[in-house]
Image (spheres, grey):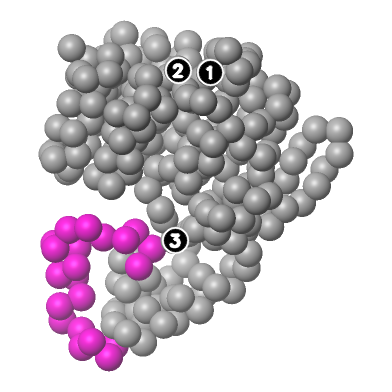
């Protein structure tokens, strides 16, 4: 594997900049370094991330077309909000397109989603609050979350929020040894059976990430059957 750089401040800064730490214990890892050392390491890392180049999207159907995606706004401009049945769009981003951005974009193509199921390793409070706002507004009728079993211990406030959302909107929170990142969004009346497969968690991550968005009833059913089986075998936070 790659060796750590000799400058330990640089190595730790890379890890923290990439993972976007939200706890003081993580930030304390840099206490032994001067602000100048940390600033220099962060500058180097930002240059490395910029060198990854722009994000890309690829439509795969009858004709392949490449698309470059640099931001949330360009995602909306270049990838359709209404994914036609049988279509798949493949997105390669350098950390500026996360799963919540894709979900927000897809919501503009329908009146609402009957149900949204998210499987992820981590989700932050701001993302849960955005999904909660969509639930309150009727844009999403049911929300189900399948997440790593350490979620409740590492993020107790977010866990309680997710459980409250599940109770209020006939949803569920299931914990297990999970590292999958799949989002399922359905609107039967619009023939929308959307599957988002991604290397990224729901939250933004400043790494090279790939995502694929499909409108496929067979693929949707494949995942929903698998995740329903997991939810039935695991204790969930559903009322």
Residue 30 lies in the magenta stretch: yes
Judged from the image, the secondary structure of the residue bearing numbered disc 3 is: loop
Q: Earlier in the sequence, mark 3 or mark 1?
A: 1
Nearer the observer, 236 or 41: 236
Give the residue drawn at x 13%, y 62%: 25
Judged from the image, the secondary structure of the residue bearing numbered disc 2 is: loop
Marks 3 and 1 in Cβ contact (< 8 Å): no
**Mark sitting on residue 114:** 2
x and y percentages locating residue 98 in the rendered image: 47, 48
Q: Is residue 10 visible?
A: yes
Residue 206 lies in the magenta stretch: no
**Mark sitting on residue 187:** 1
Residue picked out by circle 3? 206
Residue span colored magenta: 17-37
Q: Does residue 49 appear left or right of residue 40 in this picture?
A: right
Q: CA distance from mark 2 to mark 3?
A: 31 Å
Marks 2 and 3 in Cβ contact (< 8 Å): no
Q: Is residue 123 visible?
A: no
Marks 1 and 2 in Cβ contact (< 8 Å): yes
Judged from the image, the secondary structure of the residue bearing numbered disc 1 is: strand
Give the residue drawn at x 65%, y 20%: 216
Residue lying at the far bottom in this picture: please name it.
36
Q: Does 108 appear above or below 39?
A: above
x and y percentages locating residue 96 in the rendered image: 50, 58
Q: CA distance from mark 1 to mark 2?
A: 5 Å
């Amino acid at each position: 594997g790659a060796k750590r750089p000799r400058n330990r401040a640089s190595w730790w800064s890379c890890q923290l900049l990439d993972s976007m730490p939200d706890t003081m214990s993580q930030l304390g890892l840099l206490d032994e370094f001067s602000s100048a050392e940390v600033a220099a390491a962060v500058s180097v890392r930002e240059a490395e991330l910029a060198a990854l180049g722009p994000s890309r999207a690829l439509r795969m159907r009858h004709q392949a077309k490449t698309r470059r995606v640099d931001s949330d706004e360009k995602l909306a401009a270049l990838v359709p909000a209404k994914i036609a049945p049988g279509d798949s769009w493949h997105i390669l981003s350098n950390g500026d397109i996360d799963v919540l951005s894709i979900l927000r974009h897809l919501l503009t193509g329908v009146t609402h989603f009957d149900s949204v199921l998210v499987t992820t390793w981590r989700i932050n409070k701001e993302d849960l609050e955005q999904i909660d706002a969509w639930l309150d507004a009727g844009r999403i009728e049911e929300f189900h979350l399948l997440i790593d079993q350490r979620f409740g211990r590492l993020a107790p406030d977010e866990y309680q929020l997710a459980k409250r959302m599940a109770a209020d909107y006939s949803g569920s929170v299931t914990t297990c040894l999970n590292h999958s990142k799949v989002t399922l969004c359905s609107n039967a009346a619009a023939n929308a059976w959307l599957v988002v497969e991604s290397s990224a968690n729901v939250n933004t991550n400043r790494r090279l990430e790939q995502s694929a968005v499909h409108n496929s009833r067979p693929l949707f059913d494949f995942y929903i059957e698998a995740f329903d089986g997991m939810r039935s075998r695991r204790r969930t936070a559903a009322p």
